[in-house]
């Protein structure tokens, strides 16, 4: 007969185990607990005021405990408040972390979306300061990249600015025709109705919803003289026009409200108006946000949320947010070609930050493929004569200088050059499709930045940074999306989405700290053991101790 270990579910314990004894010494929950305990308590209690929360009823849960529970949940890929509340009832790690308290899911959601909304950026900055003190990061070489993450919004409810503008123009065109009809009726019976004050209805006039409602009100007032409804044919037509103007005024007011929501964007979602339509990694068009992350030594040292799909336009707001949070300025920035714009290079140069950033044409310049034979980077520049020289030795002379301003207000100056000797060129079809000859539009300042960036990237140190960039920053997104299944925000609105981003960043850093200490402790123990043996051997030789000196030392 096979013997098994004794098993009894009714066996009681004289001394119940302490929860702390059931948790591993280097478990992630201990890292979260110790890091949050080191934060300033004044920061955590900032959202709470005595006048608001001491008017009666139970006192609020401790913000430190709630922050520990939420961050630990995000570190384990649990973002649902109901699932967090379930873990507090069933999971020993959550029980230990919360001190056996069990807030419900509404309370957890209120702490996450309301109380921590305004202070989470400061909490993140405080944790980064702790990492600086412990030597995990130093803000020397940082890596920047962005990724698109879906919003908590219906993908079929996207409003496009082009459609709104088209519908608005169609409505205005219909209204102009209605105004002409009203004006004709007014002229036919001017003695009875008086002169209506119609807005300007020319092609260039900009009608507003207030104008339409004003005309509709004046028509209604004129048609209700002596509190009696007139029933002539003209009255019926004007009454119908008044009703149509009210409907059009309401529609126009809706379009005007939608235009305010757009701002500088080309779309927004009905479900989450702060979200913008973006092309995701799977090539699907969804409402989402552009998440910018800055990392160093595998830790997230900065983050921001942008409504623009362009990484280059989101870079400067990222650094400005870090500066506003009191975080130090990095010495070097490494990024891909999505950030290689003049405005970014100028911003870094003004702050004396070394830029190891590619630009869109970087690989085309290094390529030897035939399709890049007449790429503009193959055209040499003669500074003395201010002419560009094509690969066949023909000159492109200066034509004009242009100036443009982008959405952020940055001024871009470009110089146009044109070749007047392309007529008999045997390679003209490969070089240009213009009948007037090849033209180049060159930004001299950007060209200077490209040369500087190319010099940085092609050096030995630059190549090592380019190799590091993949696993330094892409690891963050891979861990979020693959391991933690963070592919969609759960909160709505730009401010709450930023809160959720900082929670994910805090959770990621906690896991990195746990892994670093886990790998550090065995090495430290072996080091101390080696030093201990060397010292005891030295002590034995010096004092001529007996051969069993180890036993004596161990007893001591």
Image (cartoon, rainbow, N blue to C red):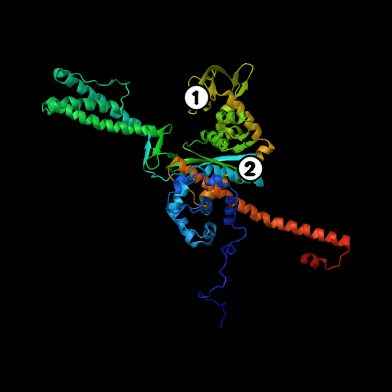
**Quick one: label 2, few (<14), some, or many (20+) residues within 10 Å?**
few
Q: Is residue 51 above or below residue 365?
A: below
Question: Residue at coordinates 60% horizontally, 49% vertically from top-left?
Answer: 38
User: Residue 7, position in %: x, y?
Assistant: 54, 76
Does dot 1 land on a helix, a strand or a loop? strand
Question: Residue at coordinates 59% horizontally, 64% vertically from top-left?
Answer: 21
Instruction: Give the mark toward the camera: 2 or 1.
Output: 1
Structural distance between the alpha carbons of marks 2 and 1: 35 Å
Q: Earlier in the sequence, mark 2 or mark 1?
A: 1
> Mark 2 sits on what residue?
467
> Mark 1 sits on what residue?
405
Q: Is residue 321 left or right of residue 224?
A: right
Question: Residue at coordinates 33% horizontally, 32% vertically from top-left?
Answer: 255
User: Residue 247, position in %: x, y?
Assistant: 25, 32
Between 243 and 13, which is closer to the camera in this rendering? Answer: 13
Q: Picture quarter containing residue 443?
A: top right
**Quick one: label 1, few (<14), some, or many (20+) residues within 10 Å?**
few
User: Residue 107, position in %: x, y?
Assistant: 44, 52
Q: Picture quarter containing residue 278?
A: top left
Between 29 and 389, which is closer to the camera in this rendering? Answer: 29
Between 385 and 156, which is closer to the camera in this rendering? Answer: 156
Q: Is residue 434 left or right of residue 387?
A: left
Between 134 and 380, which is closer to the camera in this rendering? Answer: 134
User: Residue 519, position in %: x, y?
Assistant: 66, 55
């Amino acid at each position: 007969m096979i013997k098994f270990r004794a098993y009894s579910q009714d066996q009681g314990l004289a001394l119940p185990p302490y929860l702390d004894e059931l948790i591993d010494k280097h478990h992630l929950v201990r890292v979260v607990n110790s890091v949050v305990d080191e934060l300033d308590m004044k920061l955590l209690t900032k959202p709470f005021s005595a006048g608001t929360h001491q008017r009666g009823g139970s006192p609020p849960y401790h913000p430190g405990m709630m922050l520990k529970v939420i961050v630990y949940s995000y570190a384990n890929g649990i973002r649902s408040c109901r699932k967090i509340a379930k873990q507090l009832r069933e999971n020993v790690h959550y029980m230990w972390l919360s001190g056996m308290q069990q807030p419900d899911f509404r309370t957890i959601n209120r702490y996450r979306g309301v109380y921590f909304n305004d202070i989470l950026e400061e909490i993140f900055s405080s944790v980064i300061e702790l990492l600086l003190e412990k030597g995990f990061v130093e803000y020397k070489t940082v890596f920047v990249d962005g990724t698109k993450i879906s919003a908590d919004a219906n993908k079929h409810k996207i409003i496009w600015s082009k459609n709104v503008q088209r519908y608005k123009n169609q409505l205005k065109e219909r209204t102009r025709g209605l105004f002409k009809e009203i004006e004709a009726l007014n002229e036919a019976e001017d003695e009875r109705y008086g002169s209506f004050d119609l807005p300007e209805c020319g092609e260039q006039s900009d009608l507003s919803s207030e104008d339409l409602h004003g005309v509709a009100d004046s028509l209604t007032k004129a048609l209700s003289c002596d509190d009696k409804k007139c029933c002539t044919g003209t009255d019926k037509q004007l009454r119908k026009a008044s009703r149509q103007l009210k409907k059009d005024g309401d529609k126009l007011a809706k379009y005007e409200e939608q235009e305010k929501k757009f701002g500088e964007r080309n779309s927004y979602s009905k479900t989450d108006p702060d979200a913008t339509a973006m092309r995701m990694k799977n090539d699907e068009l969804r409402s989402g946000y552009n998440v910018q992350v800055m990392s160093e030594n595998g830790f997230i040292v900065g983050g921001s949320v942008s409504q623009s799909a362009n990484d280059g336009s989101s870079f400067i707001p990222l650094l400005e947010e870090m500066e506003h949070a009191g975080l130090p300025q990095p010495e070097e920035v490494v990024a891909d070609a999505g950030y290689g714009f003049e405005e970014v290079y100028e911003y870094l140069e003004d702050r004396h930050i070394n830029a190891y950033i590619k630009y869109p044409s970087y690989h085309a310049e290094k390529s030897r493929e035939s399709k890049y034979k007449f790429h503009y980077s193959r055209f040499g520049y003669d500074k003395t004569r201010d002419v560009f020289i094509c690969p066949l030795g023909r000159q492109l002379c200066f034509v004009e200088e242009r100036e443009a301003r982008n959405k952020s207000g940055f001024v871009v100056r470009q110089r146009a050059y044109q070749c007047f000797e392309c007529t008999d060129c045997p390679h003209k079809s490969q070089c240009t499709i213009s009948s007037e000859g090849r033209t180049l539009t060159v930004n001299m300042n950007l060209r200077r930045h490209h040369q500087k960036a190319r010099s940085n990237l092609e050096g030995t140190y630059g190549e090592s940074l380019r190799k590091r960039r993949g696993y330094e920053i892409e690891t963050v997104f891979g861990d979020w999306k693959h391991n933690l299944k963070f592919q969609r925000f759960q909160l709505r609105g730009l401010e709450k989405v930023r809160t959720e981003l900082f929670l994910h960043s805090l959770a990621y850093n906690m896991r990195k700290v746990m892994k670093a200490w886990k790998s550090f402790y065995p090495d430290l123990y072996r080091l101390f053991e080696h030093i201990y043996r060397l010292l005891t051997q030295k002590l034995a030789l010096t004092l001529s101790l007996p051969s069993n000196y180890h036993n004596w030392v161990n007893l001591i």
